[in-house]
Image: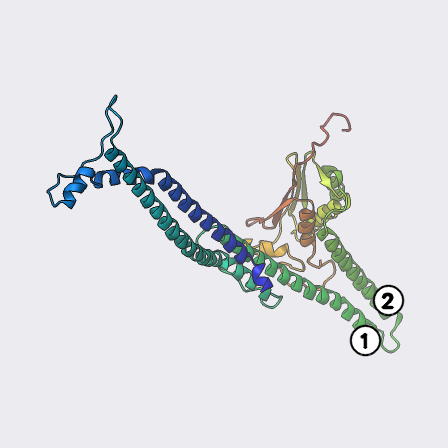
Amino acid sequence: MRALIQSERTRLTVLYGSLLVLAGGGLIALINVLLRNALYGSIKGAVITAVPGTAFERAARQGESAAPAVPAEPLPSGAATPTREQLQQWAVTRNLSTAVEAATLHELLTVSLIALAVFAVLSIWLAWWMAGRVLRPVGVITETARRLSGENLHERINLKAPPGELKRLADTFDGMLDRMQGLLGAQRRFAANAAHELRTPLAVQRAAAEIGLAGDPPPEKVARIRDKLIGVADSSEHLIESLLLLAVSEQGLESAEPVDLAALAEAELAAAEPEPGVTVVRALAPLTVTGDRALLGHLVRNLLANAVRHNRPGGRIRLATSADGVLTVSNTGPVIEPGDVPRLLEPFRRRAERQHTAGEGAGLGLSIVASIARAHGAKLRAVANPPPSGGLTIRLRFPEPAPGPRPGGPGA
């Protein structure tokens, strides 16, 4: 009972019902006031026309034919004092008009109160029905949200209603469920892929220790097994560092400062080791952005590492910054289908299946780039280059870049 009293439907019913009852009561009060002011004059005119004068009364009592009743006329200006018969006729007319007016107003008030009571009951019922109709979509949204869990995120409201605020609310809720389902699926894939990626090197290490070092192996074999274990350990360390970096970038920025992105890109490019024969094209215009220097360094480093790893002999790498806040890294390489590009930005996603060979990445590079870009409010756009050059072009647009130092000016 308390829940019913505190429900939104009850509040809306009280509000709508009160407004309707007030409107009905105001209308009835207005009608009564207007009639009270005009009713006496109307009744008096009608009674004066219908009530016969004294001569007509005598004619009626004596059975004589009487002339038609005529309205009483006011005394002409300067006329003598009214006669006794005229005063009696005026008194009868006034008393009759007053009595008719009182009876009419009493009857009108009684009927009005009865009509107001019926109208109030109908108004409350109508308000309750209207409130239920208005809040029905909210109830559907509430029940859907109550049923949802990790196992049935595929359910949607799909509200069938005309365009309006509640329809937009339901559609927004459905869109939110789509995003939640996508995030949950990505989280599950991430956990499964991370477990797989971490389990594989552990299995290699165990096999190398149990099989390669079984018995009394010669020193040469021990050296090979040692190098193998060190390589696997390095790969596992790189994977763990990448996972930690991805987790840190997903948490957002703890601090931000102006960063000369053009100089940072130049330094990372100098540290990169492209294959012999790969052409490097620079177009580094002054660009200063606000962000975390370490994370931005990882962003540029991963972009360049991806461009170097997935290039081809005699290929090309292009690194560019522009004053309007855009960082671009483009490379030649294998031809990528445009529909596969968004998938490459997800963790542990590669263009081809992993072979667990030396120098092969874990499939986290571009996902880390996307995460760092989100943390800095940058918009990332990845486009597959058409054949025959192939490869990928990644463009990052940072918000409101700060003006960088001008060539030849102070600090140049």
Decide: few, some or many residues near mark 1? Use Cα within 10 Å; few <14, some 14-19, many ≥20: few
Which color scheme did the rendering employ for the protein?
rainbow
Position of residue 31 relative to residue 114, above or below, is: above
Q: Position of residue 16 (x, y in %)?
A: 48, 52
The circle on residue 223 is: 2
Foreground residue, 7 or 161?
A: 7
Q: Which residue does the image show at 87% across and 74% down from the upper left?
A: 217
Evaluate whether residue 141 shows in this view: yes
In the rendered structure, which amino acid carries the disc numbered 2? Ala
In the rendered structure, which amino acid carries the disc numbered 1? Ile
Q: Position of residue 346 (x, y in %)?
A: 64, 57
Q: Which residue does the image show at 59% across and 54% down from the upper left?
A: 342
Point out the residue furthest to the left here: 65
What kind of element bears circle 1? helix
- The residue singled out by tag 1 in the image is 211
Position of residue 384 relative to residue 263, above or below, is: below
The mark that comes first in sequence, 1 or 2, is 1
Point out the residue furthest to the top here: 78
Q: Position of residue 397 (x, y in %)?
A: 63, 41
The circle on residue 95 is: none
Foreground residue, 192 or 270?
A: 192
Q: CA distance from mark 1 to mark 2?
A: 14 Å
The quarter of the image holding the N terminus is bottom right
Decide: few, some or many residues near mark 2? Use Cα within 10 Å; few <14, some 14-19, many ≥20: few
